[in-house]
Amino acid sequence: MTVCTPDLKEERRLRSQGYECVAGLDEVGRGAWAGPVTVGVAVVRPRVTRRSMPPWLRDSKMLSEARREEIFEAVGAWCQAWAVGHASPAECDEWGMTEALRVAARRALAGLGQTPEALLVDGPVNLLRHPDDPFAGEVRPIVDGDAKCASVAAASVLAKVVRDRLMRRDADHYPVYDFERNKGYPSPAHQTALRGYGPSAIHRRSWAFVRDLPWCGQVWSGTRSDDRGHLGEMAGDGVTLAPVDERGLVRGADLLGLPAAGAEAAARGR
């Protein structure tokens, strides 16, 4: 498998066009069956260079959980500002994924403490497009942006680590689903637990898998998550995962007063 190292070409292109405050944005948890959908946003410093990028900064899916934890602090410090926003499982059910992603992105932007003039967004579509609540700045969707753009890769790592920590915390409350390992994605153990126990309070009950549970009289159809079969994880780069410090699980304030998820902002560099 070829692993791409992101660069700053797109960020520099935007700066050359007059946009001073440039940020990358990425989501995690879209294909999970439980837990929030999470969006990270990372603002790059004005005169940042590729040489200053933290080692191992790349698409979070290309890193093991242990490696992501290892570089988390360095990635956050490299950013001028960063924040993470969530939409809860109930909000995913109520609004659908497109709107839940947009709301999570808005919450992340609200947690920054500054408004980017331009955003690089991973994927082919603008997550922030909405007729009644448009984003005032420039938005540029970049296919495989988390592999190509350093700011998007940073947002990807920060969002993934924060969401993983939330899922490891919730694993203590719902031990049968193996959330500490699968992070809400449909691993075999997770699927087996669902067939035996049904969904928990943090499952997305409008997802198709609920209709296929045995107690609904249907058979599971084999739907896969959107993380290319890795169930939210990549393994094998030789790093041992350290125990989670529960005190640092979610740093910062819940800026919007959300009941189950909010915006975690980095204060460094402001």
Image: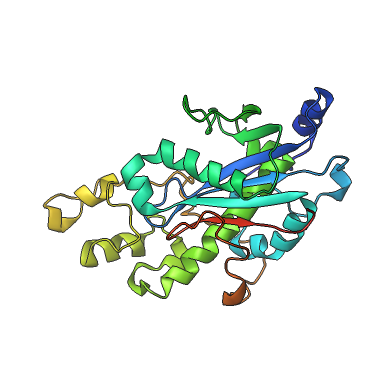
Horizontal side, residue 258 vs residue 50: left or right:
left
In this rendering, the count of numbered labels is 0
Residue 259, percent from left and from top:
42, 60
Name above or below for residue 54 compared with residue 98.
Answer: below
> In the figure, is residue 24 to the left or right of 196?
right
Q: Residue at x 47, y 64 (%)?
A: 167
Residue in the picture at 69% in, 60% down: 72
Q: Is residue 57 above or below residue 46?
A: below
Query: How was this image coloured?
Result: rainbow
Is residue 3 visible in the rendered image? The answer is no
Q: Nearer the viewer, residue 48 or 261?
A: 261
Q: Quadrant of residue 221?
A: top left
Q: Is residue 184 left or right of residue 47?
A: left
Seen at 58% across and 50% down, the residue is 61
The x, y position of residue 93, in whole percent, is 32, 46
* Of 43 and 59, the residue lying toward us: 43
**Residue 72 visible, this orientation:** yes
Give coordinates of residue 33: x percent, y percent: 36, 53
Q: Quadrant of the N terminus?
A: top right
Residue 120: percent from the left, percent from the top? Answer: 66, 33
Quadrant of res 141: top right
Q: Nearer the viewer, residue 197 or 112?
A: 112
